[in-house]
Amino acid sequence: MSAALIPVAPDVLTRLLTLRRAESESLDELLRRILPPAAKPAGTSAARAIAATRSASGGSVSYVLVGEMHAASDATDAMITILRDLAQYDDEFFPKLAAKVRGRTRNHVARSRSEVYPERPDLARYVKEVGWGWFVGCNIANREKERILRAACDVMGLTFDRDLKIDLQHA
């Protein structure tokens, strides 16, 4: 194996080290685990894999996040799990996302349940905590969930349909 020296900013190195599963995991092992594979074999596509998983699992939603396949019970569960996963890499993720997805009559992401649907307190039961005192409204169509996920990718510098591949029905 040939080694290469790559300059890494101290804050990036610190973030990488927090992702290790054990003290003994090397940076090389960590990067191999979290980075997507270099190339996929011809004839396979993430879209086909997602569709096959959905049909085989009876309606669950599958997605690929940075090369790793995941499954969720439904579109709402997938959105919440993806947001939680992305938030672990940036302490300012939720404030940035909240600003990007603020609606005309609702705040899709907010600091309290009541702020999510400010004019509709009856919808508070559809609000779920996504982490660190942040809440997301789940009484939304899949096209809105996709819009939120696209904004989340944008906040994190990821590309939707490349770094995050998800097929939400009717989105």
Image (cartoon, rainbow, N blue to C red):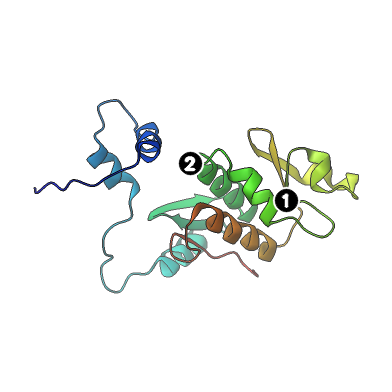
* Residue at the spot 35% in from the left edge and 41% down from the top edge: 9
Q: Residues within 10 Å of mark 2 (few under 14, many from 20)?
A: some
From the viewer's perspective, is 56 left or right of 10? right
141 is higher (above) or lower (below) than 90: below
Question: Where is residue 103 shown, x and y percent of the image?
Answer: 78, 58
154 is higher (above) or lower (below) than 94: below
The answer, for residue 57, to whether it is visible in the render is no
Task: Give whichever of discs 1 and 2 has the lower sequence position.
Answer: 2
Along the line of sight, the residue nearer the viewer: 105 or 42: 105
> How many numbered callouts?
2
Disc 1 element: loop
* Residue at the spot 45% in from the left edge and 65% down from the top edge: 52
Q: Which label sits on residue 149?
A: none
Disc 2 element: loop
Mark pair 1, 2: CA separation: 23 Å
Give the residue number, with chain letter if any, for mark 1.
138
In the displayed orientation, state which residue is furthest to the bottom.
43
The answer, for residue 90, to whether it is visible in the render is yes
Question: Where is residue 167 shown, x and y percent of the image?
Answer: 54, 65
Q: Amino acid at mark 1?
A: Cys
* Residue at the spot 27% in from the left edge and 46% down from the top edge: 32
Give the residue number, with chain letter if any, for mark 2.
89
Q: Amino acid at mark 2?
A: Tyr
Question: Where is residue 85 shown, x and y percent of the image?
Answer: 51, 43
Q: Which quadrant, please, contains the C terminus?
A: bottom right
Closer to viewer: mark 1 or mark 2: 2
* Residue at the spot 50% in from the left edge and 63% down from the top edge: 160
